Image (spheres, rainbow, N blue to C red):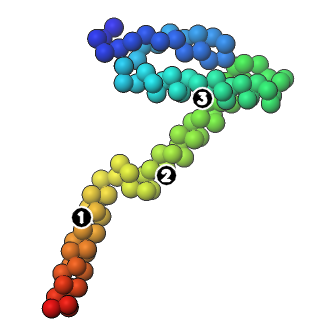
Amino acid sequence: MKEDEVSISVNIAGKNYPIRVSLSEKPLVEKASDLISERFDDYQNNFLNLDNQSLVSMLCIELATELVKSKLVHQYSGINNPNTDDVHKVNQLIDRILNKESITESI
C-alpha cells in the first residue's frame, strides 16, 4: 500500500468490499458509497420481485447514464475543452476594443 493510501470498506447490496484509495479520494468514495446504498435501497423498495444482482445492474445503468449526461454538459459548456481558452482570449480582446472605443468616444 502506498503511503498516501488508506483501506476502507464499501458496502454495496449488503456485501462489503475492501478497497484502497488515496487520502484525497476517501471522502469522495465514501460519498459515492452512500449514494449507491441510498439508491439501492430505493430500488429494493420499488422492485420487490427482483434479486440484488438485477437491482445493482439497474443502478449501474442509472449512474452511468448520469455520468454520460454530466460529461456531455461539461463538453458543450466548454469545461475541459481546449477551445475554451481561445474563446476566452477573443472575448477579452473584444472587451478591450470596446472599452478603448468608449474611452476615445468620451474624449
Name the element at disc 1.
helix
Name the element at disc 2.
helix
**Mark 3 vs 2, N-terminal side:** 3
Residue 106 versus residue 47 in the image, above or below: below
Label 2 is placed on what type of residue? Val
**Quadrant where the image shows the N terminus:** top left
Q: CA distance from mark 3 to mark 2?
A: 21 Å
Q: Is residue 6 visible?
A: yes
**Residue 65 pos. (x, y %):** 59, 40
**Mark 1 vs 2, N-terminal side:** 2
Mark 3–mark 2 CB contact (< 8 Å): no
Q: CA distance from mark 1 to mark 3?
A: 39 Å
**Residue 7 pos. (x, y %):** 43, 10
Residue occupied by mark 2 = 73
Mark number displayed over residue 89: 1
Total number of numbered discs in the rendering: 3
Q: Quadrant of residue 93?
A: bottom left
